Image (cartoon, helix red, strand yellow):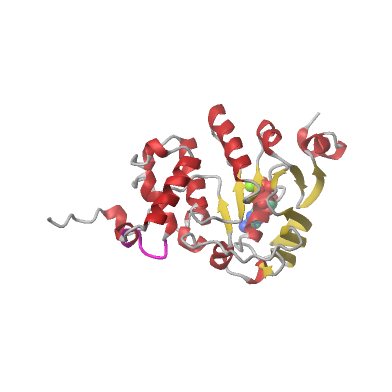
Amino acid sequence: MRATPVPEFMLEPAYDPNSDAGTSRDSLGLGRAAGAGLDVRHGTILTLEDINVSFDGFKALTNLSLYIGVGELRCIIGPNGAGKTTMMDVITGKTRPDNGKAYFGETLDLTRMSEVQIAQSGIGRKFQKPTVFEALSVFENLELALKTDKSVWASLRAKLSGEQRDRIDEVLSTIKLESSRHRTAGLLSHGQKQFLEIGMLLMQDPQLLLLDEPVAGMTDAETEFTAELFKSLARKHSLMVVEHDMGFVGSIADHVTVLHQGSVLAEGSLADVQADERVIEVYLGR
Ligand SMILES: Nc1ncnc2c1ncn2[C@@H]1O[C@H](COP(=O)(O)OP(=O)(O)O)[C@@H](O)[C@H]1O
Ligand SMILES: [Mg+2]
């Protein structure tokens, strides 16, 4: 057989590492198995205590304390600028807090780990914009998510084990893209790209998933499927979901945290926080 020339897009990952950290898969350490030995003996998977972050004197997070239980599906709401994304930046090591505690399980100090180490330890993050490899097929995107320690081209040439194929099939079914497995990712709808990216995260089997505004721009049907998907992922995984869509939040959340000016303003069931005068004042409106 004649050697086929390597298409240019396969030589380098199709992302600009400087545009947004969400596109920088290698720096996120995707391609590694989640740490199975996480110590969660007290039932808490994530601990944030008295976290402060300031940017040139502006306080983005102020004494933020928040705890996520193992298997919990937590929704984070709050006005723009409340610090939701900054909090995820702290958890994933993208931003270092000025002070405060951030622990994954009982023993992993997130403030002392690199972004890659944090991703490898089992925290997966999905940014708002889908960042799939548009020129590759759905299947190849999932394949790459398994093994990004090599270049894109080397990864696609390396043979998959039967177990890896099964895992890809399983994830394809979870994200309902089985029938699009050979489709070029660039041809998927916006919602399907979001599902594919969630699938890429799932290939790593992360224990904690952080999802920033996952249903923004989705159709109603896609939003409904996302709700089903997240509910099916909870328990086995812990999820932290930032979202403005209250219908969506109401359909999935065990527990809601309202952030305002970098701190927790209220916490409880959606009904509890919706009835809270301070929350109505700053966020929900009258
Ligand atoms: N890198 C940065 N430099 C300066 N200010 C920032 C930076 N990142 C976030 N901020 C500011 O911190 C505040 C919180 O932002 P963010 O966490 O993005 O809020 P949210 O996600 O809740 O909308 C905003 O006022 C934002 O302008
Ligand atoms: Mg944000």
* Residue 231 pos. (x, y %): 63, 40
**Is 189 in the magenta?**
no
Q: Is residue 57 visible?
A: no
Q: Residue at x 67, y 69 (%)?
A: 108
Quarter of the image with the N terminus in it: bottom left
Please, is residue 105 above or below residue 170 in the view? below
| Quadrant hosting residue 46 | bottom right
Please, is residue 198 above or below residue 205 in the view? above
Q: Residue furthest right?
A: 277
Q: Is residue 54 visible?
A: yes
* Residue 106 pos. (x, y %): 72, 66
Q: Residue at x 74, y 58 (%)?
A: 43
Quarter of the image with the C terminus in it: top right
* In this rendering, position of residue 236 left or right of residue 60: left
Q: Residue furthest left?
A: 2
- Magenta region: 148-154
* Residue 273 pos. (x, y %): 81, 38
* In this rendering, position of residue 11 left or right of residue 63: left
Please, is residue 50 above or below residue 125 in the view? below
* Residue 180 pos. (x, y %): 38, 37
